[in-house]
Amino acid sequence: MRILVTGGAGYIGSHVVRLLLEHGHDVWVYDNLSRGHRQAVPADRLIVADLAEKERLDQVLVLQRVDAVMHFAAWCHVDESVREPAKYYQNNVVNTLNLMDCLRRHRIRRFVFSSTAATYGVPEQVPITEETPQRPINPYGAGKLAVERALADYATAYGWGYAALRYFNAAGASPDGRIGEHHEPETHLIPLVLMTALGQRPHVAIYGTDYPTPDGTCIRDYVHVDDLAEAHLRALERLEPGKGWCYNVGIGRGYSVREVIRAAEEVTGRPIPVVAADRRPGDPPVLVASSEKIQRELGWRPGYTDLRAIIETAWTWHRSHPRGYR
Ligand code: UDP
């Protein structure tokens, strides 16, 4: 298939691009490189452009005769979304609708969407299934949910076949250490912990030590980025006109912030100093997936089920790329 991957030079996108190419798909990456990295994707597959540029998008869709779109391009920081909601609604909602409008005009109806566990807000029970009510508590989750709703309407009215994958916490890196996670500034827990192990930062701030969890710190479900990539490949194969599928993608096991830090100390063999800090706005205490539906319907299974193994791949990346892609 000819697949356009928006945001394909970003962390999750670049791992998906690699897997799609390995499976013989004809892949085009559409990325404005605002947070993505040129080095993360093959140079001859990269189109540097923004989703707000409708004419450019039109041109690309015609020239490359795209069959399907995987849409990763988005801002992805919960706390930033609380501080700057306008930025999030503009890029994650308006620009996505822009893209969807172009696709509609070109009669491209296959769409795989990067959604998020943040659409659930503070769930009433864990593990979270796809039927858990979606009540986001931050603009990041609210924007992603708005797009999910629009997609459901596009499926009904225009016959789109789509899948919305609700990621829990993407983690790790390609095990050969060639691509990995690099955000500027870095805000995600595992990279920050490993940068501290490398001596690049003095300590890790634990955001909240008084949550209603066994050790007082937030619990998340960390899923390996290559397993996430595999979920996209399967979702793509499953698309059917007029139908929408929503799947949680996580390993079904939660780890607290303190457990992540302890696991990283074991993997790296280095002490990781911590300081207790205030809660971060917009953070729910516990997010753990039931991924039973994607396992049953798409035959997806996480290859990495152990946090240490996931952190090991991230450690390989951080050690070999102490300055990320720079
Ligand atoms: N976290 C933390 N210190 C940090 C970064 C993150 O305690 O320096 C916590 C954060 O509050 C959350 C968990 O680690 O509970 C995972 O955060 P991350 O930003 O990696 O992913 P998110 O859950 O926001 O998608």
Image (cartoon, helix red, strand yellow):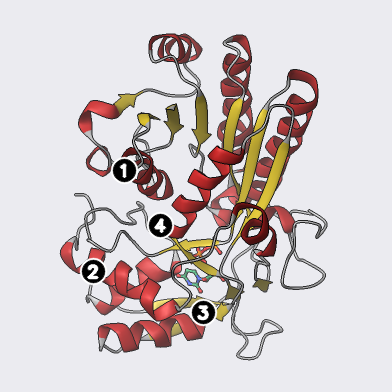
* Residue for badge 1: 22
Instruction: Measure the C-alpha gap from mark 2 to mark 4.
Output: 15 Å
Tell me what residue is drawn at x 30 percent, y 56 percent: 180
SS for callout 3: helix
Tell me what residue is drawn at x 32 percent, y 25 percent: 48
Look at the numbered discs 3 and 4 and tell me whether their residues touch, using CB distance below 8 Å: no
The amino acid type found where label 2 is placed reads: Thr
On-image quarter of the N terminus: top left
The answer to whether mark 3 is within 8 Å of ligand 1 is yes
**How packed is label 1: few (under 14 Cα within 10 Å), some, or many (20 or more)?**
few
Q: In this rendering, which labeled residue sits more in front, label 2 or label 4?
A: 4
The amino acid type found where label 3 is placed reads: Val
The image quarter containing residue 204 is: bottom left
Instruction: Measure the C-alpha gap from mark 2 to mark 1.
Output: 22 Å
Q: Which of marks 3 and 2 is nearer the N terminus?
A: 3
The amino acid type found where label 4 is placed reads: Asp
User: Up-down: is 221 above or below 118?
Assistant: below
* Residue for badge 2: 316
The amino acid type found where label 1 is placed reads: Glu
Q: In this rendering, which labeled residue sits more in front, label 3 or label 1?
A: 1
* Residue for badge 4: 226
* Residue for badge 3: 257
Q: Earlier in the sequence, mark 4 or mark 1?
A: 1
Q: Does 120 sit left or right of 208 as displayed?
A: right
Instruction: Measure the C-alpha gap from mark 4 to mark 1.
Output: 13 Å
- In percent of width and height, residue 238 lies at 61, 40
Look at the numbered discs 2 and 1 and tell me whether their residues touch, using CB distance below 8 Å: no
Tell me what residue is drawn at x 33 percent, y 87 percent: 265
Look at the numbered discs 3 and 2 and tell me whether their residues touch, using CB distance below 8 Å: no
- In percent of width and height, residue 35 lies at 37, 42
